[in-house]
Image: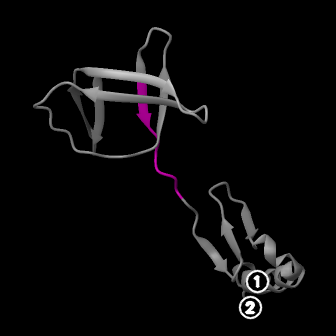
């Protein structure tokens, strides 16, 4: 099996011999475990999110997914944020625990108004 890891702008390949076990967990999720048989192999440990493809003939291809780029909030309140997305759209997000549903209308109106007042500085500067 070839293990590929990118180091800044160059790619290094390491060939390792071992045993791969493919299966399914009790929750129905696919699993793949690789046990290396090379005693002298030294690899820097890492974790990441991957796209993994297992072919019918048993070939396995794994590619690390890029890190998620989060938008920075333009304005924040206790339970609400206003963010400008990478797609050029403004997003207003309001979250509140279910047990506080009796406070939802009052908090939503108060915080939406507060963010709207702050947002006026974005477009309407005197």
Q: Locate residue 76 relative to residue 66 in the image: left or right.
A: right
**Which residue is painted at 71% across and 85% down in the image?**
121
Say which quarter of the image contains residue 116: bottom right
Q: Locate residue 44 relative to residue 82 in the image: left or right.
A: left
Residue 120, disc: 1
**Which residue is painted at 69% across and 74% down in the image?**
81
Q: Nearer the viewer, residue 64 or 1?
A: 1
Q: Please say if 25 is above or below 74.
A: above
Q: Position of residue 89 (x, y in %)?
A: 72, 60
Mark 2, residue position:
126
Q: Position of residue 78 (x, y in %)?
A: 69, 83
Q: Nearer the viewer, residue 55 or 27?
A: 27
Q: How many marks?
A: 2
Say which quarter of the image contains residue 102: bottom right
Q: Locate residue 21 relative to residue 103 in the image: left or right.
A: left
Asked whether residue 90 is drawn in magenta, I would say: no
């Amino acid at each position: 099996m070839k293990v590929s890891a990118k180091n800044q702008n160059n790619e290094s390949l390491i060939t390792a011999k071992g045993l791969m076990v493919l299966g399914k967990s009790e929750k129905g999720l696919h699993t793949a475990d690789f046990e290396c048989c090379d005693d002298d192999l030294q690899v820097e440990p890492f974790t990441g999110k991957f796209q993994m493809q297992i072919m019918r003939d048993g070939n396995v291809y794994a590619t690390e997914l890029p890190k998620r780029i989060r938008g920075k909030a333009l304005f924040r309140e206790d339970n609400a944020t206003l963010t400008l997305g990478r797609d050029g759209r403004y997003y207003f997000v309001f979250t509140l625990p279910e047990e506080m549903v009796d406070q939802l209308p009052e908090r939503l109106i108060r915080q939406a108004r507060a963010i709207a007042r702050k947002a006026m500085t974005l477009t309407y500067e005197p």
